[in-house]
Image: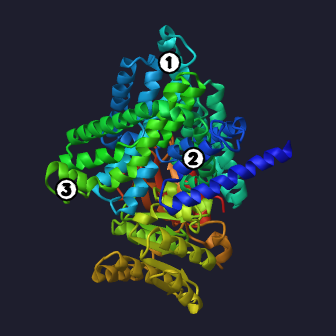
Amino acid sequence: MLEQALVQMLLLLGATVAVVLVFQRFRIPPSLGYLLVGVLLGAHTAGPVVADEYIRVIAEFGIVFLLFTIGLSFSMPQIYALRHTILGLGTAQVALTTAVVGGLAWAMGLPGPAAFVVGAVFAQSSTTVITKQLMEQGESQTRHGRLGTTMSVFQDITAVPFVVVIPVLGVVAAQEVAGALGLALAKALLAFVIVLISGRLLLRPLFQLVAERRSAELFTLTVLFVSLVAAWTTKTLGLSMAFGAFLAGMVLADTEFRHQVESTIRPFRDVLLGLFFVSIGMLVEPALLPEIWWEALLGAVALLGIKLLLVTLIVRLSGVELQTAFRTGLLLAVGGEFGFALLAIGLEGGVIASQPAQVVLTSVLFSIILAPFLIRFNQPLASWLFGRPARRPDESLPAPRELDEQGHVVICGFGRTGQTVARFLESEGVEYIALDLDPAIVREARLAGQPVYFGDSSDAAVLENVGLARARLLIISHEDRPAALKTLRHAAQLKAGIPAVVRTRDDSTVVELCEAGATEVIPETLEASMILTSHALQALGVPLHRVTRHLQEQRAGHYQMLRELFRGSLDNIQDPRPAGEQERLHSVVLHEGSPAIGQRLAELNTERDQVSVTALVRNEQRRRYPEADTEVRADDVLVLLGTQDSLEKVERRLTGAGRPTTED
């Protein structure tokens, strides 16, 4: 028995490696390769057969992890902020496509629930195919490219309700659908509340505790545990496991661990998603193709045509000029991989019969095969149809900041040097994202309103997650030479030619770092932080006289900005001064009832304890060096500078509580 299972596993892995290698060689989406493996090894074709009962069980976790990573891309504040723009366009496209296609399917004789599934499947578009093809032809940053990519990503989140609704349709009679849907939505709301509340109370402290252990193995186990517990919660309530994983991802999207979590889960997601596509391929019955090919072809034409018209109309009505709207419609006309997931859910729940499911499946496959050609020739097609070249001035649509950082700086390491550089960038209004593996620094910095995330900058997936491919500059401010070399090599693959400023202890590694891709290597001196900052600002195009003015101001002020540091566990060891004499930054939250509420900053008398207020965070807005007459409100965060003993004394006076929460 064990030997037979091993033989089947080797057959599956061997066939998958061979097919995907060939498909990648000819630049064909790997998802089609996985589908082909499923067809070849399924029970509906001649040759070796791999038992699918276990594969389908394991493959379901591919969808769980897919929804988990989608949730990581959409936090609640981001969704709310985008409700009137791209979110509206994406939702309208999914709703209208589902209604139009579902209505046509119902008119052709399909039962209502089955017609609904067909509409939901056709409403999805392939983010993988769209983004890959646009990048290959250099159109990923055009206006239609950004619109198409962002709307396809939003389709994933608007498809989450389908995951909740479709299983219900197969277990109730038509007259009971409304009540069952109401119950399902009530359960979904309950699951949302459970995961949201428990996640906010437990997930951040849990990941902080795990991050402090600095163990990649423990972090991976925690990510798997959290995603599967959330999936089990919704499964217990009678909902889809994928829905729970999506909610858990949304909760973690608001934390500093978001990018590292996504990097950790990605290998599991990709492998299990490949297995999911294999299981979908096993559903294909090639023997039926002679009977259904014309229906499938008509279905593919309907899918492409209806979505092209609807997307063009929706985008045009939003104020975008017609030719750009048409090109966006060509991108989104393709079917999507997530539609396979919805179809599998419908088949498993008995909502749709095997025969129409085969037609729908083949139609989506046809559209995905045609997609690269439609996307590749979207410009000639638009020019031929409208008789004029596409307008170029409009192709500067800024992507939503929450989804796509653009033109920012990536700082690897948020210790003394990284924080110094970040403050100068902030003073110039330059956006940045920082990465660090010290949870104490990350926690304090984020509480102070700074965009700092827990993550290993030498991990290519983490660099990709923070948008290095769209960054203006890379700064490596830590002293880990092997990690810096790995970061530079990954950066060169993600964005060839990106300027990279690197800090090193001495000049012995300058040549090695330059060969790895560093633009500027700064050997450490007494003013290493100032020199690195000078190079970084000049690389960003800041005029030299302004850079010089900043440096002169800091020297005249006895390097005040350089002393403002969040200290991690290693700083106390590296700093030769006693811990009690080391100045540090500390963030204090003033909750309702704190004695300081209602007072002005001048009235707090922090100076008498040799503590200064360097920043105030209110409503997620950070203000550097606030005015002395600023009145303190509930939920404000004061960023204080002083020694540990002084900070403890001031915090007790301001909050009426005990010692600071910072762990040294």
Q: Quadrant of residue 500?
A: bottom left
Q: Residue 224, percent across and down?
A: 67, 46
Residue corresponding to mark 3: 390
Label 1 to label 2, Cα distance in Å? 36 Å
Residue drawn at point x = 54 percent, y = 56 percent: 259
Amino acid type assigned to the residue bearing label 2 in the image: Leu
Residue 304, how many percent across, how many down? 34, 39
Q: What quarter of the picture does the N terminus occupy?
A: top right
Disc 3 is placed on an element classified as: loop
Q: Residue at x 38, y 39 (%)?
A: 80
Question: Which kind of residue does numbered mark 1 sit on?
Answer: Leu
Residue pointed to by mark 2: 36
Question: Which structural element holds mark 2?
Answer: helix
Is mark 1 in CB contact (under 8 Å) with mark 2? Answer: no
Mark found first going from the N terminus, 1 or 2: 2
Q: Are marks 3 and 1 in contact (CB under 8 Å)?
A: no
Q: How is the image coloured?
A: rainbow
For label 1, the SS is helix
The one of 591 and 172 positioned closer to us in this rendering = 172
- Please give the residue where the numbered disc 1 appears in the rendered image: 181
Q: Quadrant of the C terminus?
A: bottom right
